[in-house]
Amino acid sequence: MSYARKLFAASAVLSLCIAAPAFAKIETGSTVSDMTVTDSNGAVHNLSDFAGKKLILEWTNADCPYVKKHYTTDNMQKTQRLATADGDTVWLSIISSAPGKQGFVDGAKANQLTEIRAAAPTAVILDSEGTAGRAFAAKTTPHMFILDESQTLVYQGAIDDNRSANPADVAGAKNYVLATLEDLEAGRTVVDAETSPYGCSVKYGL
């Protein structure tokens, strides 16, 4: 290979590395308490505000077929309602799509989607710069994270155990979010503390 080609190849590899940085995974069992986020109504929250409550983080992208699978079947909405029914659980739906990328929305559109889909998150977080997404190393939509009352990360991974995008496959799948909440309620160690997330890649900017 000529020097010019070697230089070009090296430059291409460097550019690829810069464009697609690796995100450090937050280990299950770690405490996650200090992160500021802004919701679709412009309100600012810190994760520390939710100490004493269970916290569910759902990475979402309304245009992703895997997300559509769970919303068109009411599976995500049902999970949101069941999870927050006790008043001791907070659910944040997080949109980390960058401007110009699939799934990017502003606050008004995010609120419209919540209303149209009869979704029931506590709040929708706009993370177009990808700060929260990168901090959690969120990879897919959906990608779920659950913190207990002490703000310890007790679950991260898929919403369920059927990796298909077919809405018909929701029925009969094991819902890892509800299973985790059942384990916590019973005082048990979470059985499936980590699973492999599936879905569309999170559409981060550069």
Image: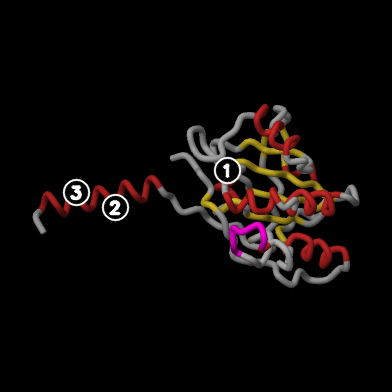
User: Disc 1, disc 2: CB below 8 Å?
Assistant: no
Nearer to us of marks 3 and 1 is 1
Q: Looking at the picture, how far across and down is residue 198, in whole percent?
A: 58, 60
Identify the magenta region.
163-168
- Badge 1 crowding class, 10 Å Cα cut-off, few under 14, some 14 to 19, many 20 or more, is few
Q: Looking at the picture, how far across and down is residue 110, in whole percent?
A: 67, 34
State the residue at coordinates (17%, 50%).
Answer: 7
The residue closer to the viewer here, 147 or 66, is 66
State the residue at coordinates (71%, 67%).
Answer: 173
Nearer to us of marks 1 and 2 is 1
The amino acid type found where label 3 is placed reads Phe
Could you tell whether 167 is left or right of 134 in the image?
right
Q: Looking at the picture, how far across and down is residue 147, in whole percent?
A: 74, 55
Could you tell whether 158 is left or right of 50 in the image?
left
State the residue at coordinates (11%, 59%).
Answer: 1
Quarter of the figure that contains the C terminus:
top left
What residue is shown with label 3?
8
Residue 3 lies in the magenta-colored region: no
The amino acid type found where label 2 is placed reads Val
What residue is shown with label 1?
63
What residue is shown with label 2?
13
The residue closer to the viewer here, 115 or 205, is 115
